[in-house]
Amino acid sequence: MTLHYYFARRFLWLFLSILAVFALFQGFVDLMDEMRRIDGDPSLGQLLQLVALKLPEGLYQILPLVMILSTVALFLGLARSSELVVARAAGRSGLTALLAPVTVALIIGGLTVAMLNPVVAATSKRYADLRETYENGGAAALSIGAEGLWLRQGGPLGQSVIRAASANAEATVLYDVSFVIYAPDSGPAQRVVAEQAELGEAEWVLTNAKAWPLAAGLTPESGAKMHETLRIPSTLTRESIRDRFGKPSAIAIWDLPAFISDLEEAGFSARRHVVWLNMELARPVFLIAMMLVGAAFTMRPTRLGRTGISVLSAVLLGFGLYYVRNFAQILGENGQISPAMAAWVPPVASVLLALGLILHMEDG
């Protein structure tokens, strides 16, 4: 057990160290990117706040790469110091030496899904809201429930609250829709009801709409007007709605089952969210696969040479398996394969492939 604890501590320390290096590098890159993308003159505090909120999502995406590099660093260090040779001479096989790193990878994967996933969901949502506020003067929001779909848009002309009974798959065409438009720094100024509202370029195009003024001292019905076509300015874009409506990563894994149920009750397709839920549950298995891939190419003694080729092969194979996993996700979201198959087959196949490579390296 002492040897297992030793391997586990070294692997965990290397994982945290490499993750910290990537966090520092990504923070500088994100800071430069935010300075370039945000219009106006944001303060340094605002930029640092955006970078801090964006950082967890970026680190969450590169965890497989960090896992491979940590494994490579661990076993290269053990091989150079001959500790792995001593462990084998003591009667422990290479597979036994992998028990501690595999356990640590499993714990990291479980904590990542259970704790880091909700953090990423909260910070990415907060990042989108703050960025919208800094650019347009108000944050946009979207909510879906059994009573329909709710949107909030902001801008220099004031806030607008939108409710629709139903919508198309991208939530860019709303049906049986109502708008409550607020004056800047004031209360509601107008209410509009329409059969349909379609999002165009910086505006909503309403069909068969009726508008009521909500000014003080004025009877709304006396000032109501009918419009065959009515245009309302909007700061929303198709991309921003798509990100909020169809981006499952912005929802914590603990809230995903209820959100999927609300989507289906509202008449929307929840396939993308179901696939994402299964992929998050399978993430610990995929992280273990990445660890085994790194070990398969670096458990050889360094005296055999070709260390650089082995490291490059491990990283390239890891990238290949990562893209196969993403391709399976796309197939699952498009309905070509079932969500469970899209989420679980690539990680399990990756584990089996890595184990085959390790057995081949160990036993020839």
Image (cartoon, helix red, strand yellow):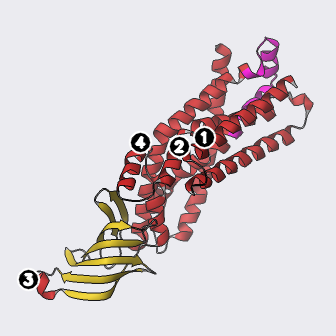
Residue wearing tag 2: 278
Q: In which quarter of the image is residue 29?
A: bottom right
In magenta stretch: residue 328: no
Question: The N terminus appears in which quarter of the rendering?
Answer: top right
Q: Measuring 66% from the left and 30% from the top, which residue is drawn there?
A: 11
- Stretch in magenta: 68-95
Q: Which mark is residue 217?
A: 3
What's the amino acid at mark 3?
Gly
User: Disc 3 and disc 4: Cα gap in Å?
Assistant: 48 Å
Q: Specify which label sits upstream in the sequence, 1 or 3.
A: 3
Kindly identify the amino acid type of the residue bearing the numbered disc 2.
Asn
Q: Name the residue under label 4.
A: 254
Kind of residue at badge 4? Trp
Q: Nearer the viewer, mark 3 or mark 4?
A: 4
Q: Mark 1 points at which residue?
A: 344
Q: Give the crowd class for mark 2: few <14, some 14-19, many >=20 residues within 10 Å.
A: some
Label 3 crowd bin: few (<14), some (14–19), many (20+), radius 10 Å: few
Q: In this view, does 75 lie to the left or right of 193?
A: right
- Residues at marks 2 and 1, CA–CA distance in whole angstroms: 7 Å
